[in-house]
Image: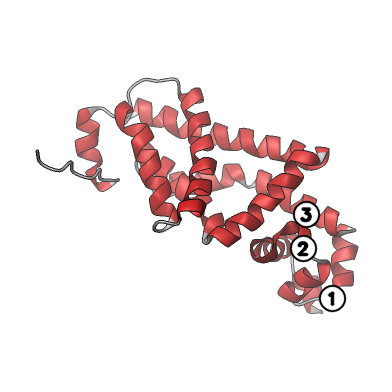
Amino acid sequence: MSRHRSLTDEQLIAATARVIGRVGPVRLTLADVATEAGLAPATLVQRFGSKRGLLLEVARAGTAGVAGCFAQVRARHRSPLASVFAAVEMMAAMAATPEELANHLAFLQIDLTDPDFHRLALDHSQATEDGFRALLDEAVAAGELHRCDTARLARVIGALESGSMLTWAIRRQGPVRTWLRKDLETVLKPLRPYKALSRGAAVFRYPKRPAG
């Protein structure tokens, strides 16, 4: 059996995502993806029809995978609130460097101007918000957060995640995961009961204020 027949659509989509991270969706060619995956460009045409078809599958796979990402994070942490932090950090993986973030943001331009991509982006946004809200509801039930409007807070965290990464790319101070974590700590600290802050020391720590 030839190699290209052994590669799943999931593997080809992952290869495409890696190329997007390096050159962005506009400069990406089927030849680039074929080289990354180790197959002929004609194979990609047979599977996806065109570059646009391939990019749509990348967007579709990203949207479909959101719930699974949240489930994976929740399974790794006993604390719902720790899972919120872990989910944000997982999303930060798309921005290992400012250049990589810029290339992924170029995909957002397509999302905002092409109706087919926009529908997928909208579903992705809603799925992300739903994932955060479920974790926040658990955190409230576990006493890790005061009772609050978790739907609104989930939307704020989604906005923070995107905006904070963009600010990090401009400021370039330390790792993006650390930058995001500190911003999320700032948002959530007022909602945390004092006792929960003490119990949650292992989850994350706030910097001590200077004396005086």
- Name the residue type under label 1: Ala
Residue 134 location (% of width, % of height):
49, 31
Question: Which-is-in-front pick, marks 2 and 1?
Answer: 2
- Name the residue type under label 2: Arg
Question: Which-is-in-front pick, marks 2 and 3?
Answer: 2
Q: Determine the CA span between mark 1 and mark 3.
A: 17 Å
> Disc number at residue 55?
3
Q: Which residue is mark 1?
A: 40
Residue 125 location (% of width, % of height):
63, 36
- Name the residue type under label 3: Leu
Q: Determine the CA span between mark 2 and mark 3.
A: 12 Å
For mark 1, give the secondary structure. Answer: loop
Quadrant hosting residue 162 = top right
Question: Which-is-in-front pick, marks 1 and 3?
Answer: 3
Q: Which residue is mark 2?
A: 27
For mark 3, give the secondary structure. Answer: helix
Q: Is residue 184 above or below residue 43?
A: above
Q: Nearer the viewer, residue 111 or 81?
A: 111
Decide: marks 2, 3 in contact (CB < 8 A)? no
Hey, which residue is sitting farthest left in the picture? Answer: 212
Q: Determine the CA span between mark 2 and mark 1.
A: 18 Å
Q: Nearer the viewer, residue 208 or 78?
A: 208
* Residue plotted at (38% across, 33% down): 187
Mark 1 or mark 3, earlier in chain: 1
